[in-house]
Image: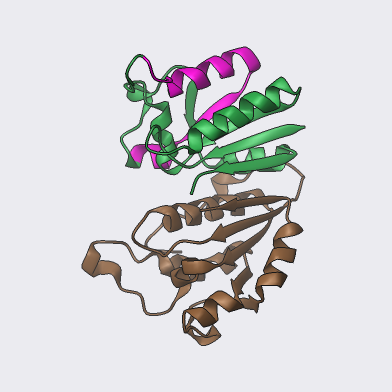
Chain colours: A brown, B green
């Protein structure tokens, strides 16, 4: 369990029978605004609905999953650890956009979770195949 | 078509909620259904009953409440995002209700199309 965020428990199961392809698109840096943290809260709740969940990291959003974060100096919680708990909720489809990664001087080894690095064109195609895309 | 709407920005400071409202209005006028509008991030501020814009300006909260009443649109404010920002039952405007993020995922599952308004 994560020490920094509330994760959904057994009491938050919802049965609809419908499984849709959800994609949460992370575009913002982890700190500086609350978008990243509150997207992660959406992702965690979606786990209780047994949906086919995908996470995309584009633009500065990929900084959310960079290793070795310590935002204590700016009085913020280090919620990056929560991403490591996602596989326990069967959320394992994480994608990083290659062009954005290279622009930022990052490599696959810089991330604290396993991700699939795909091109911008592939990301567009993947997104196009989703039923619900939520982003911030 | 059945639409779900997510509003991610607050009132007056940002165009998002106005565009969401205009979209919902146009969709309903065309015979579509807007089943739920979910207010998240600073979007929760749209549901504050203490909002009082100058009289010659649009009254955002009231516009939504009227739409909800006339067309059965479910206006849901995220409880966690609301608490962070001081929005709770005591400050909630008429026509809105407070509930969890599950309501967002649920409308995503039920609606034909999910629309996000915000940065």
**Residue A114 visible:** no
- Is residue A131 rendered to the left or right of residue A2? right
Rendering coords of residue A62 (x, y %): 49, 71
Residue furthest out toward the front: B56
Q: How many marks?
A: 0
**Residue B13 visible:** yes
- Is residue A72 rendered to the left or right of residue A59? left
Identity of the residue drawn at 67% across and 76% down: A119
Q: Quadrant of residue B61?
A: top left
Of residues A117 and A22, the one nearer the viewer is: A117
Compared to residue B23, the image places residue A89 above or below, namely below
Rendering coords of residue B112 (x, y %): 75, 39
Rendering coords of residue B53 (x, y %): 33, 21
Q: Examine the residues drawn in magenta and state their main secondary structure.
A: helix
- Is residue B31 rendered to the left or right of residue A50? right
Whether the magenta-drawn stretch holds residue B74 is answered as yes
Identity of the residue drawn at 61% across and 69% down: A94
Whether the magenta-drawn stretch holds residue A116 is answered as no
Identity of the residue drawn at 50% across and 45% down: B118
- Is residue A44 rendered to the left or right of residue B114? left
Q: Quadrant of residue B31?
A: top right
Compared to residue A2, the image places residue A47 above or below, namely above
Q: Which residues are magenta?
A: B56-83
Q: Quadrant of residue A71?
A: bottom left
Of residues A65 and A96, the one nearer the viewer is: A96
């Amino acid at each position: 369990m994560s020490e920094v965020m509330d994760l959904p428990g057994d009491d938050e199961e919802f049965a609809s029978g419908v499984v849709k392809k959800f994609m949460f698109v992370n575009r913002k840096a982890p700190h500086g605004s609350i978008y990243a943290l509150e997207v992660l809260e959406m992702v965690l709740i979606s786990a209780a609905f047994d949906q086919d969940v995908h996470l995309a990291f584009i633009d500065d959003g990929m900084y959310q999953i960079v290793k070795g974060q310590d935002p204590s100096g700016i009085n913020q919680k280090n919620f990056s650890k929560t991403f490591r708990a996602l596989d326990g909720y069967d959320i394992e489809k994480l994608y990083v956009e290659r062009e954005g990664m290279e622009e930022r001087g990052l490599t696959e080894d810089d991330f604290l979770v396993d991700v699939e690095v795909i091109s911008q064109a592939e990301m567009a195609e993947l997104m196009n195949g989703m039923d619900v895309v939520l982003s911030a | 078509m059945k639409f779900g709407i997510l509003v991610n920005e607050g009132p007056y400071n940002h165009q998002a909620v106005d565009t969401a409202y205009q979209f919902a209005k146009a969709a309903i006028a065309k015979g579509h259904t807007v089943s739920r509008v979910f207010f998240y991030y600073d979007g929760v501020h749209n549901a504050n009953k203490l909002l009082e814009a100058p009289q010659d300006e649009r009254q955002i909260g009231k516009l939504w409440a009227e739409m909800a009443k006339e067309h059965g649109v479910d206006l849901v404010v995220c409880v966690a995002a609301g608490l962070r920002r001081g929005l709770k039952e005591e400050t909630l405007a008429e026509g809105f209700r407070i509930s969890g993020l599950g309501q967002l995922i649920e409308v995503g599952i039920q609606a034909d199309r999910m629309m996000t308004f915000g940065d």
